[in-house]
């Protein structure tokens, strides 16, 4: 079933993402579940990382978004985040697939 952009924007989506530190090229995997206004809030979430409000990313700011995936269910987003963090093969495969995005950021 194909969904239109307005339909997608009216749906509560969860986003899994990878951000890259401009300070030392470190990659951080995360997800955000509070997407009431979808993209605007996601930008605010990235802004929180750059303002040092997240303890895990504070010392490596500034951060840029290099990859994002949308999910209808938060369980799927959290499962994907866990798989990327704990299964090196899955993470390595994704990094190979998005290598140009990572290098260009």
Image: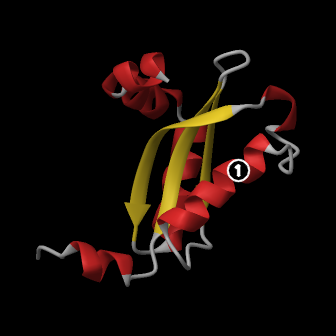
Is 63 positioned to the left or the right of 73 in the image?
A: right
| Residue 86 seen in this snapshot | no
Q: Which residue is drawn at the image coordinates 67% and 57% (left, top)?
A: 45
Label 1 residue SS: helix
Q: Residue at x 45, y 16 (%)?
A: 103
Please give the name of the residue rendered at 52% of the width and 70% of the height, measured from the top-left corner.
75
77 on left or right of 25: left
Q: Do we see residue 91 in this rendering? A: yes
Q: Is residue 28 above or below residue 76?
A: above
Q: Please tell me in which quadrant of the rendered image residue 31 appears.
A: bottom right
Viewer-side residue, 99 vs 104: 104
Instruction: Give the answer, above or below, for where 32 lies relative to 60.
Output: below
Estimate the x, y position of residue 51 in percent, counting from the top left: 82, 45
**Viewer-proximal residue among 56 and 78:** 56
Q: Residue at x 70, y 50 (%)?
A: 47
Q: Quadrant of residue 6?
A: bottom left
- Asked if residue 69 is positioned above or below residue 104 in the image, the reply reads below
Residue 55, percent from left and from top: 88, 45
Q: How is the image coloured?
A: secondary structure
- Residue denoted by label 1: 47
Percent position of residue 26, x then y: 67, 22
Q: Foreground: 65 or 94?
A: 65
Q: Quadrant of the N terminus?
A: bottom left
């Amino acid at each position: 079933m194909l969904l239109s952009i307005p339909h997608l924007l009216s749906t509560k989506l969860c986003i899994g993402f990878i951000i890259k530190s401009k300070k030392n090229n470190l990659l951080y995997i995360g997800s955000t579940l509070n997407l009431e206004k979808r993209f605007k809030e996601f930008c605010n979430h990235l802004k929180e990382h750059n303002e040092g409000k997240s303890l895990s990313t504070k010392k490596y700011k500034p951060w840029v978004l290099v990859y994002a995936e949308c999910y209808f269910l938060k369980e799927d987003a959290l499962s994907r985040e866990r798989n990327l963090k704990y299964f090196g093969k899955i993470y390595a495969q994704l990094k190979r697939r998005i290598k140009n995005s990572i290098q260009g950021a």
